[in-house]
Amino acid sequence: MQFATWNVNSLTVRLPQVIDWLAANPVAVLGLQELKLTDDKFPLQAFLDAGYNASFFGQKTYNGVALLTKAQATNVVKNIPNFTDEQARVIAATVPSSWGDIRIVNGYFVNGQAPGTDKFEYKMNWLRGLRDYLRNELEKNPRLVVMGDFNITRDDADSHDPEGLRETIHHTTLEREQLKALLALGLIDAHRLVHPDLAVDKKDKFFSWWDYRDFGFRRNRGLRIDYVLASEALKPHIASCTIDKTPRKNERPSDHTPVVMELRP
């Protein structure tokens, strides 16, 4: 059973790429971020035709998240309960599996712009609200998957230039402490679990995002900021976690590429 996350940076632009990717990679669940469209513009029929149900939460021009699921999702919740937010950033739902129901939380985490700004403070508050929410979710749903564009590098192994970018956005100590606190709830970074040596051998890095500018992808000047996290109850079933760079080679690609976790009995 495979779970994937992909920031498509405009579903209107990238819809054919998403459909093609699903045909080649028929994952059980795909979380999308940065839809950049309102719900009335969501291409529901295209996904139904591709064999996927869709739960979505969009807004005009910015943000927006969706869950595409082979099985019908239930108990869909939009945004963080008890946290006031006008932006469409989180969607959660439950899907069946051979181990029992799995709760999925798909998020487009706040970028934060730069330390010391109002947007950065919003990011800190949002992350605290998300942590409270996930703590409650884990109490109710021991089988939990959290995926999305986190807009945080976990550590220096996840940045092409950790020294040059130190304490800039995505690299600050405050952001990394927030991510560490999320993991401390009992969540496993699937990619790091499968590729532990990357934390030591920083010459061989895996990234999920590359800047459009300055030939970022060609020069592998990227960041790992897209994650699939799994709860401790699912840890024994994590068989693989890969970053599929193929869509980043497309014409007019997203600046992100899919991350795929596979669970097996």
Image: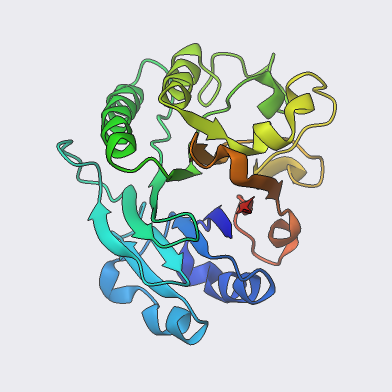
Q: Where does the image place residue 127, in percent across and percent down from the top left?
A: 34, 28
Viewer-proximal residue, 38 or 264?
A: 264
Direction from residue 12 to residue 130 in the image, left or right: left
Tell me: residue 60, above or below residue 86: below
Identified at 78% across, 18% down, the residue is 200
Direction from residue 38 to residue 161 in the image, left or right: right
Q: Where does the image place residue 83, in percent across and percent down from the top left?
A: 18, 36
Viewer-proximal residue, 226 or 114?
A: 226
Picture quadrant where residue 161 is located: top right
Picture quadrant where residue 163 is located: top right
Picture colour scheme: rainbow
Q: Where does the image place residue 262, in percent across and percent down from the top left?
A: 63, 53
Identified at 26% across, 28% down, the residue is 132
* Quarter occupied by the N terminus: bottom right
Q: Where does the image place residue 193, in percent across and percent down from the top left?
A: 66, 32
Identified at 81% across, 47% down, the residue is 218
Residue 162 appearing in the image: yes
